[in-house]
């Protein structure tokens, strides 16, 4: 039985996503963009302890038509283990609440991966094999956790880096274990010639657009991330 008084569990990667998701009726967790650490964190829970699971944060674009700030409400998550469908009622609730957010909002599958997809070629290949509109490193872990515990799953992801744009190679290592930006790692990459000023400026611009859109979405969702309470 799902406890209708339990919080919604928001599964995030970055510390900024976790802070943004937290609020009334929401328990937010994250593991610094590390899906292996996230699995251990979720596996340590004796019970689900929630009435729904929502993957919440930013994502990389796979659909070439999507731009930074565009919103994807997941219809399912495709990973190497197959496809897990999102809960239709929860997804519909999110779509309804976000319809007037001012951002482009689509319903589409997400791809979940354990290793960051940095290159344009990698994104193109993943789009072809998965059919997904965006990719992140938490949604597949969150969906699997929800499935094991029999609680509904939904996903809300905002595009940061578009399909036609590669991420700098240092980006995968530029986070602390808690999901905060690792300034020292960024400085080291820049000093060693592994990062260019133009790349940093473009990434900052796209991140700002993504988080501004994510913040607007969060404000519209309100308590419990807008997820209706399950009936007793």
Image (cartoon, rainbow, N blue to C red):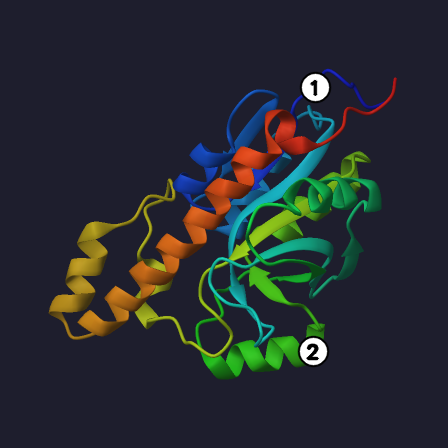
Instruction: Answer few, some or many: residues within 10 Å of disc 2's Cα (few below 14, many 20 plus, some between 14 and 19).
Output: few
Instruction: Answer few, some or many: residues within 10 Å of disc 1's Cα (few below 14, many 20 plus, some between 14 and 19).
Output: some
Name, please, the residue furthest toward the left: 191
90 or 11: nearer the viewer? 90
What SS does tag 1 mark? loop
Q: Is residue 113 visible?
A: no
- Residue 118 numbered tag: none
Tell me what residue is drawn at x 18 percent, y 70 percent: 197
User: Is residue 141 rendered to the left or right of residue 190?
Assistant: right
- Residue 129 numbered tag: 2
Task: Measuring from the top left, give residue 226's x and y in whole percent.
Answer: 67, 32
Task: Measuring from the top left, give residue 111's x and y in whole percent.
Answer: 64, 63
- Residue 6 numbered tag: 1
Is tag 1's residue or tag 2's residue first in the polypeptide sequence?
A: 1
User: Is residue 128 rendered to the left or right of residue 170?
Assistant: right
Q: Quadrant of residue 24?
A: top right
User: Is residue 118 rendered to the left or right of residue 25?
Assistant: left
């Amino acid at each position: 039985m799902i406890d209708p008084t339990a919080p919604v569990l928001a599964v995030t990667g970055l510390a900024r996503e976790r802070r943004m998701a937290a609020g009334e009726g929401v328990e937010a967790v994250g593991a610094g963009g590390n899906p292996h650490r996230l699995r251990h964190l979720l596996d340590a829970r004796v019970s689900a302890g929630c009435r729904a699971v929502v993957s919440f944060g930013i994502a990389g674009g796979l659909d070439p038509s999507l731009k930074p700030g565009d919103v994807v409400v997941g219809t399912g998550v495709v990973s190497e283990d197959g496809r897990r469908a999102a809960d239709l009622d929860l997804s519909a609730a999110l779509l309804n609440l976000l319809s007037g957010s001012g951002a482009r909002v689509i319903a589409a599958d997400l791809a979940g991966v354990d290793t960051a997809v940095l290159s344009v070629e990698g994104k193109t290949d993943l789009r072809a094999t998965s059919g997904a509109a965006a990719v992140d490193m938490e949604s597949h872990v969150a969906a699997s956790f929800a499935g094991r515990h029999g609680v509904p799953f939904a996903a809300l992801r905002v595009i940061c880096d578009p399909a036609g744009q590669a991420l700098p190679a240092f980006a995968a290592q530029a986070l602390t274990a808690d999901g905060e930006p690792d300034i020292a790692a960024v400085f080291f990459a820049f000093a060693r010639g592994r990062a260019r000023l133009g790349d940093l400026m473009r990434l900052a611009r796209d991140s700002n657009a993504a988080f501004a859109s994510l913040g607007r979405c969060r404000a519209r969702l309100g308590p419990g991330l807008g997820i209706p309470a399950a009936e007793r």
